């Protein structure tokens, strides 16, 4: 019997939706799927609630990242914020609940904890008969991802699985899949074709400098440092959806225009990452998963306190990245690394070992290959044990 699949994400940052899109593409490739629907859960809520989740997060990233980091750490205790947060979610999600009930999914996959909480509540009340799989979108695990009801968790790395097992989660329900990236990362690339398309030379290092999907205006400061490199390089600057930033960068690099390719949003990111030498940017969960899937070493700048700091730790620990704590050292660090081919080679190998270009396919195959499994219901005792497990942190 073919399956009806519902994928739910939120637009609180771009990573959750990117992972959901990767899963949608993978599900659509299967003949076992009758219908797959991929929705941003916030589209079914009111403007005030959407602003709370999406716009507030973006504003804090720009204006008060220190507070964001403090809240990330403060709330990272099992169930600490759940009752109030889940109540607020339910009060603002009636249209979403109505849609879910009408769609009647056989398989539900959530790439954000907000819709996962809604699905878990419906399952507990007996209002929905589905399987709930939760796909985390950072290398580390935050307690807000904990669900009182679930069928499966899919996580990025072995350490995250070990953490969940220590909390008391059944290990057979936790799969180390990696974070879902576009299936294009699993496909071979015609390097010469991409080089020709962007008028790049195969014998010179290629640096990708990314502003993220929203287009971080601070990118201009990094570009200024790249322009001061002693090493002869070629640089692809990706400005995302920020048109003004792209225009400003084009003016900034005019004197060295032959060395720079300035792009807005691009659908060629998978191919560009596969031919690049280094990636310079922020360590969002999806961004670094894409880089690792392309075996591309990362130069970390401006990580958001909290989840991006933790992502950074994992890449640095595995030798797949370096970090620039000050913008003043970007030129020095890039020149030094680009002139150390042995270290670059080792970093690429380390990145390759972390890469999971097939993460989306693995998740889909796992969910479609198994018959219905009984959901895990965490009792009050289970929850208390989880709190006890982390009380000395």
Image (spheres, rainbow, N blue to C red):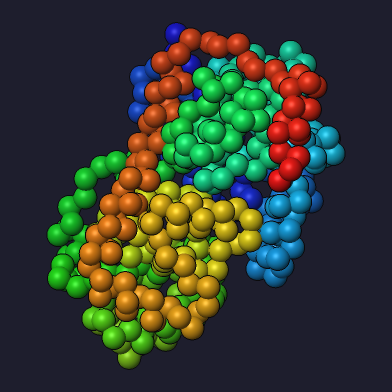
* Residue 253 visible (yes or no): yes
Residue 11 is situated, as x and y percent measured from the top left of the image, at 61, 48
Q: Is residue 381 left or right of residue 359?
A: right
**Front position in the image: 327 or 274:** 327
Coordinates of residue 173 in the picture (x, y in percent): 54, 22
Residue beneath the point at 60% across and 53% down: 307
Viewer-closest of 303 and 386: 386
* Image position of 375 (left or right of 311): right
Q: Residue at x 50, y 63 (%)?
A: 282
How many callouts does the rendering have? 0
Q: Is residue 188 left or right of residue 250?
A: left
In the picture shown, does residue 351 fall above or below 330? above
Residue drawn at point x = 23 percent, y = 64 percent: 342
The answer to whether residue 262 is above or below residue 316 is below
In the depicted structure, whether residue 103 falls above or below residue 56: above
Residue 305 picture quarter: bottom right
Picture layout, residue 151 above or below residue 59: above
Q: Can residue 103 be seen in this snapshot?
A: no
Residue 57, given in percent of the width and then of the height, sits at 69, 57
Q: Quadrant of residue 182?
A: top left
Residue sitting at the far front: 392
């Amino acid at each position: 019997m073919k399956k009806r699949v519902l994928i739910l994400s939120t637009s609180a940052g771009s990573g959750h939706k990117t992972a959901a899109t990767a899963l949608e593409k993978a599900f659509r490739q299967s003949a076992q799927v009758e219908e797959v629907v991929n929705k941003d859960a916030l589209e079914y809520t009111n403007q005030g609630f959407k602003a709370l989740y999406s716009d507030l997060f973006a504003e804090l990233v720009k204006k008060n990242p220190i507070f964001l980091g403090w809240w990330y750490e403060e709330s990272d205790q099992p169930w600490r914020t759940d009752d109030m947060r889940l109540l607020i979610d339910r009060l603002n999600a009636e249209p979403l609940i109505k849609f879910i009930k009408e769609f009647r999914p056989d398989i539900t996959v959530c790439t954000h904890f907000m819709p996962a909480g809604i699905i878990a509540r419906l399952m507990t009340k007996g209002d929905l008969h589905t399987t709930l799989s939760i796909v985390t979108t950072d290398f580390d695990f935050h307690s807000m991802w904990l669900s009182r009801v679930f069928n499966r968790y899919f996580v990025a790395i072995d350490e995250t699985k070990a953490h969940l097992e220590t909390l008391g989660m059944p290990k057979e329900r936790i799969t180390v899949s990696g974070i879902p990236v576009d299936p294009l990362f699993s496909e071979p690339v015609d390097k010469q074709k991409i080089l020709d398309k962007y008028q790049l030379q195969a014998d010179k290092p290629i640096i990708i400098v990314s502003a993220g999907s929203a287009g971080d205006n601070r990118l201009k400061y990094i570009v200024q440092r790249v322009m001061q490199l002693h090493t002869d390089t070629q640089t692809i600057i990706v400005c995302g959806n920020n048109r003004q930033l792209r225009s400003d960068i084009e003016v900034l690099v005019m004197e060295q225009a032959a060395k720079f390719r300035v792009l807005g949003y691009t659908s060629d990111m998978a191919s560009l990452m596969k031919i690049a030498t280094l990636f310079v940017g922020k360590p969002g969960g999806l961004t670094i998963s894409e880089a690792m899937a392309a075996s591309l070493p990362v130069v970390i700048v401006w990580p958001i306190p909290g989840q991006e700091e933790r992502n950074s730790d994992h890449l640095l620990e595995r030798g797949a990245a370096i970090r620039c704590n000050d913008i003043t050292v970007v030129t020095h660090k890039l020149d030094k690394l680009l002139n150390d081919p042995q270290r670059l080679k080792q970093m690429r190998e380390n990145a390759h070992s972390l890469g999971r270009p097939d993460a989306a396919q693995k998740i889909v195959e796992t969910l479609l290959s198994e018959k219905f499994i009984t959901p895990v219901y965490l009792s009050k005792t289970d929850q208390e044990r989880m709190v006890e497990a982390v009380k000395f942190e």
